[in-house]
Image (cartoon, rainbow, N blue to C red):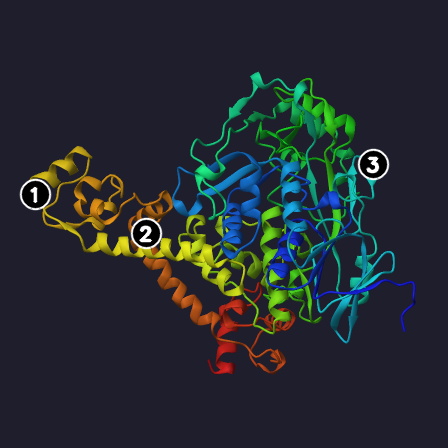
Amino acid sequence: MSDQNTIEERYDAVVVGAGHAGCEAALALARMGQETIIFTVSMDSVAMMPCNPNVGGSSKGHLVKEIDALGGEMGKNIDKTYIQSKMLNRSKGPAVHSLRAQADKAEYTRSMRIVMENTEHLTLRQAEVSEIIIENQTVKGVRTKSGAVYYSKTVVLCTGVYLNARCIYGDVVNHTGPNGLSAATFLSDSLVENGIPIRRFKTGTPARIDKRSIDFSKMEEQKGDETIVPFSFTNTEEDIKREQISCWLTYTNEETHEIIKKNIDRSPLFSGAIEGTGPRYCPSIEDKVMKFADKNRHQVFVEPEGEYTNEMYIGGMSSSLPEDVQYAMYRSVPGLENAKIVRNAYAIEYDCISALLLKPSLEFKEIEGLFSAGQMNGSSGYEEAAAQGLMAGINAARKLQGKEPVVLDRSQGYIGVLIDDLVTKETKEPYRMMTSRAEYRLLLRQDNADLRLTDIGYEIGLISEERYEKFCKKRDLIQKEIARLSETMVGANKTVQTFLEENGSTTLKTAASLADLIKRPELNYELIAPLDIERNSLYEQPLSKEIIEQINIELKYDGYIKRQRSQVEHFKKLENKRIPANLNYDDVHNLRKEARQKLSEIRPENIGQASRISGVSPADISVLMIYLNI
């Protein structure tokens, strides 16, 4: 019998942490009908952006579009709160086009909190979770620092960088989470007691500078795009277009680097005071200067933190150097000579786990009903966290519904690549998504995320009937128009030849389809309109930009797309070859010792996943397939 002074409540699901992973997990659970409570150390930290003030970017833009296609919230929220929008890599092919938007940090948090507070089946609670209640390797709920107990059948850990967090610059150590918020100091012990090993990672953030102390005349202005591409497929350009706010570009120089080198012994990163492993692809400025000694300058992006604040984020100059060195270092940069620091740069260390402990559904292999997402899993970045949070929330809800988990494979989305990498490959540093990690980049473009994933979002209940009907009409129009263009022929007559000559295109020797003409680099769907007599009678209104974009890409990259689809078919065959969950790898003779150890530790669900494990060779896979007779 429980103590009469102990608060006890019951929910279907508990989410621990209300950062980007926690928000997506909780919203997915609640929208799928599960009574959910989400805990945060501070209501001010809901969807907080403690580091860079932007969403998206190279490969990360793909993740946000995929989150939206599945029914998540991040894309809608940044569309409401952006202050500048830019499509990166426009000079390259569509596979690596990546949308990025500067966010108004305060508005982003406020807007997401409004959505959370007004979602049915969702309760927000400010309290520190100190213990996961586990019985017979099954999660039963959580206990807070006050002793209150919240029973539930599923728990999703989205602790971000708060577990035993400490912020460090020079010899100053603050035992807090980001932005001075309270760290979570008890939960790690509970995890260790339940057999979950903890490791230490670190990340960092640059100083924030008072805009009034910056000389922008010495910097290059970085304006947003004139044409705005929304993150959410539910929005059009007209829905979200606004007057944008500029960012600025400047550079470090040899003086900056000399200041850093002279004081490198005072950096906790180099003195050993910082124990955690930092992200390779987002290094501190002292890391960059020491590792790339041949470079005499590095880019520095000066970005507004919001529309109604004078704080400017100094991108590219994260640091844990002492305060006096920070002043000297920043003031050596053109335009920052009189810089006034609002917030010091700092490194933050925190506890996390190895995602090898998780199934591809993001549920712990050894603890039923316990899921984990975001930086807790050893990843970095808002977008990576949100993607994992969404999938963990979906799969926790599916578990409660008695349904099979939703696991995206590497051919379905960047989310599939992200999670497969985390649960299959040993990440010894914070994992960051990059386009180079995806084998099927041309198929996994950000522009077609809805065509790849919205069916799944609808099936699991996160896409409304109205949205799904609009999506189906769009998909049907694309397919029908491509088929019509492929069947509509034009002859080598004078009108056609003159048109081709005027547009710098080779004349025809024989009849060709309109689709064949669109495949030419110098032509596209809009340009060939004069030759497409049937088009005007078919459509009362011109097709949307999104539909035309899909038609152009599908036709222009037709050969490459077909080749990748063929590769995917081969990949799927290996993914469909299941490995029994209870297989004893010691019984598989001729497997090398390292392969046996890795396979026993990770316990892959199929041959495809097994083949991607570091230390498992193609020869090991052949041995395994012969043993399983597949």
Residue 459 in the image: above or below residue 241: below
Instruction: Give above or below for 51 relative to 144.
Output: above
The location of residue 551, given as percent across then percent down, is 31, 49
User: In the image shown, does 58 or 245 lie closer to the viewer?
Assistant: 245
Q: Taking 32 as reference, is 571 left or right?
A: left
Instruction: Identify the element where label 2 is drawn.
Output: helix
Residue at the outermost left position: 494
Q: Position of residue 416 (x, y in %)?
A: 52, 59
The quarter of the picture where residue 28 lies is bottom right
* Mark 3, secondary structure of its residue: strand
Q: Residue at x 22, y 44 (%)?
A: 536
Sooner in the amino-acid sequence: mark 1 or mark 3: 3
- Provide residue 265's location: percent of width, then percent of height: 77, 34
The Cα atoms of the two marked residues, 1 and 3, are separated by: 79 Å
- Determine whether, in the image, residue 137 is placed left or right of residue 480: right
Residue on which the image places disc 2: 554
Q: What residue type is disc 2 on?
A: Glu
Q: Give the residue pinned by disc 1.
A: 493
Label 3 CA crowd tier, 10 Å (few <14, some 14–19, many 20+): few
Residue corresponding to mark 3: 172
Q: Is residue 520 visible?
A: yes
Q: Residue at 49% x, 38% y: name it.
A: 240
Quadrant of the rendered image containing residue 564: bottom left
Q: From the viewer's side, name the closer residue of 306 and 568.
A: 306
- Disc 1 vs disc 3: which is toward the camera? 1
Q: Nearer the viewer, residue 576 or 286?
A: 576
Three-letter amino acid code at disc 1? Asn
Few, some or many C-alpha atoms within 10 Å of disc 1 (few <14, some 14-19, many ≥20)? few
Earlier along the polypeptide chain: callout 1 or callout 2? 1
